[in-house]
Image (spheres, rainbow, N blue to C red):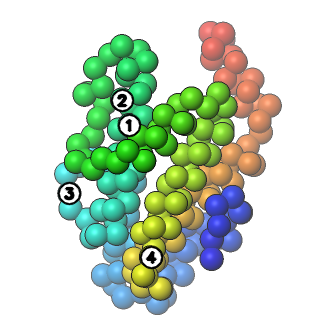
Amino acid sequence: MLHFGIRPPFSSEGFLRRCSEFAPGEDQKVLNSLPQAQDYSRPKKFMPVIQGWVDFDTSLRNELAKIRASRKHIDPAPYLRHDGFTSSAIAHIALAVHRNPSIVEAERSLDEARWQALDELTVGHYFDLDFLIIYAYKLIILERWEKIRAGDKEALLNETLARINGG
């Protein structure tokens, strides 16, 4: 079992390789072509568990875009992806994240909300294809945080300050 904040037991690529030994060909195709955020703008219908994830993540990203656009007094429409999915809970998450003064803690809050959404999608699935899909998305989240943990924070800070100062 995976828990938010732990080190990933293996990479998502390693997970997909392990699945290839046991998952039927069609299931393997689905696992190898899971949509990422950059793929959401392409209109496509996914199987229900993937659609649930895409709807949640797109809605969360849209709420963040609306808040940022409002702060800059610009129209958010060019930055929104059509999703048709709304939730007051997602709007609340986005607002709370926007108000967080720490960028890292705000990102952690976003990924914790994503993790919770994935947990909700897991209900009723016990090692079927849907469970494997959710496991793969959770591994991707854990890998992201492992990169953040392992990153040279001083070098990242110096690089960011150099960009800000025009150097």
Occupied quadrant, residue 14? bottom right
Instruction: Verify CB contact (< 8 Å) between mark 3 and mark 4.
Output: no
Task: Name the N-terminal-most of marks 3 and 2.
Answer: 3
Name, please, the residue furthest toward the front. 88
Q: Can residue 20 be seen in this view?
A: no
- Residue 166 percent coordinates (x, y): 62, 9
Q: Given this view, does label 3 or label 4 mark the residue nearer the observer?
A: 4
Exactly how many numbered labels are in the figure?
4
Label 4 and label 2: CA atoms lie apart by: 30 Å
- Name the amino acid type tagged 1: Glu
Q: Residue 123 carries which label?
A: 4
Q: In this view, does 46 lie above or below 129?
A: above
Which residue does the numbered mark 3 point to in the structure image? Answer: 44
> For numbered disc 3, what is the local secondary structure?
loop
- Check the picture and name the quadrant holding the N terminus: bottom right
The correct choice, above or below, for 5 with respect to 105 in the image is below
Secondary structure of residue under mark 1 = helix
Sequence-wise, the earlier of marks 3 and 4 is: 3
Distance from the alpha carbon under mark 3 to that under mark 4: 24 Å
First reached walking from the N terminus: tag 1 or tag 4: 1
Which residue has dot 1 on it? 63
Q: How far is the residue under mark 1 from the one under mark 4? A: 25 Å
Q: How far apart are marks 3 and 1 (CA)?
A: 21 Å
Q: Mark 2 points at which residue?
A: 66
Residue 78 is drawn in which quadrant? top left
Instruction: Report crowding for label 4: few under 14, some 14 to 19, many 20 or more residues within 10 A (C-alpha).
Output: few
Q: What residue type is labelled 3?
A: Lys
Do labels 2 and 1 touch, CB within 8 Å? yes
Quarter in which the C terminus is drawn: top right
Q: Is mark 2 on a helix, strand or loop?
A: helix
Residues under labels 2 and 1: Cα distance?
5 Å
